[in-house]
Image (cartoon, rainbow, N blue to C red):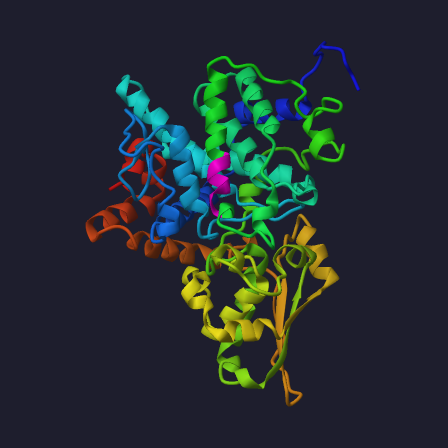
Amino acid sequence: MIKTNDITKTDQLLEDIADYVLNTDITSEEAFETARYVLLDTLGCGILALQYPECTKLLGPVVPGTVVQNGTRVPGTSYVLDPVKGAFNIGCMIRWLDYNDTWLAAEWGHPSDNLGGILAVADYVSRVNVSEGRSPLKVRDVLEMMIQAHEIQGVLALENSLNRVGLDHVLYVKVATTAVVTKALGGSRQEIINALSNAWIDNSSLRTYRHAPNTGSRKSWAAGDATSRAVHLALTALKGEMGYPTALSAPGWGFQDVLFKGKELTLGRPLGSYVMENVLFKVSFPAEFHAQTAAECAVALHDEVIERLEDIEKIQIVTHESAIRIIDKEGPLNNPADRDHCIQYITAVGLLFGDVTADHYEDEAAKDPRIDALRDKMYTVEKEQYTIDYLDSDKRSIANAVQVFYKDGTTSELVECEYPLGHRFRRDEAFPLIVKKFKENMATQFATKQLTQIEQVCLDKELVESMNVNEFVDLFTL
């Protein structure tokens, strides 16, 4: 173990990320167009989550009644918070229903989780700027920050699996948000590196709250926690707090040796706009993404199966390795967070109801004895080609197939779905439905007049991109 106190270098990964956010111009109009839909979809997911008291109880200031001058507004509420707490609030809302976008690679995650910190900081910076006679940020700036955060989180995920060492993917949210919001707050290259080093030193939460026997609601606020911590670290760096140049590589004490089994963290490809261009939308079902195509298959079989429930002998789910490792569950499911991460539960709901909604995970819906009766008849099988195509950077399929076997020896069709509705290969089909989802989600919270104004702005590409961030956020406040 090196004992010298001489610091002769900075970890290349820290420098690469800092240089990317400072020096890379995003020129892909496909990325900006996709980012606009991600923004609308993510805000809609957050607004829908306000229907659930288990989410809203976590929102608001630390001390009730606190209002911060020029503070962050929280969409769908009247809260005006400091940007750290604002990031937690927005991030918690976004992730609560497991309905925002997804990235699947060696590590998986939800890059739009970064919007919690991005929107909180962009709103705060804009309001401070206006109060001081300077120009606010534009929504186009938010879209660029989203593209960069998606890229950092997603490219880190390509080859660096946190789940394989028991750590949660929200560490990559913390790292990505830290980079882009430090820049947005006016940070220099060195301040970005300092903040990033502290984000890695923070480490990550354990994944145990995502898996049996501990699956629980922390998985719904973990990203909010990560993105708010990123804002805190960014603000701390701007006060002149030091960084740690070899936070990743320091022998014996760095992240790689302590928590990554000595492996070097790498960027799987040059940082650009690849992740935003290929990100996956959850269009139809609020379910863990490895089960999205299983839900599509189940819904397709609903009309046949619902008339023959008593005739079913067994149900086969053909899937890929990651789904088996993450969401293949038997036995009791203890809460909504447990249920929406169970491929058997999701498939059973699709077969029974011809749809999968957030309410299907709640305790009342889970009392239906037919759900567990169907689960008991299910088994999963890995298809090697599905696993290969899942990891193929040109395909990134998330394939599942479902087939029902009846007691009389007959079977249903084997219904296969390789690419879910939100996949890049199905963008033209998905975008109109994303708009429909956005409108429906907004209608759960806003009266007609405000809803009309939101739609007029948000569905006009030129108008929304050129809008001041503070005025954009005001559209969604009460």
Location of residue 362 by image quarter: bottom left
Of all residues, the one furthest to the right in this rendering is 1
Q: In the image, is residue 222 part of the stretch drawn in magenta?
A: yes
Instruction: Estimate the x, y position of residue 216 in percent, counting from the top left.
Output: 52, 51
* 405 sits left or right of 372 in the view: right
**Residue 319 drawn at (x, y percent):** 66, 63
Kindly identify the residue that appears in the image at 76 percent across and 32 percent down.
262
Residue furthest to the bottom: 408
The residue nearer to you, when weighing 70 against 368, is: 368
Query: What is the tally of numbered marks visible in this picture?
Result: 0
Residue in the picture at 74% in, 29% down: 257
Q: Is residue 258 visible?
A: yes
- Residue 299 makes an appearance in the image: no
Magenta residue span: 220-226
Quadrant housing residue 312: bottom right
Q: Which quarter of the figure is the N terminus placed in?
A: top right
Q: Position of residue 354 (x, y in %)?
A: 46, 72
Q: Residue at x 46, y 57 (%)?
A: 283
Q: Is residue 199 magenta?
A: no
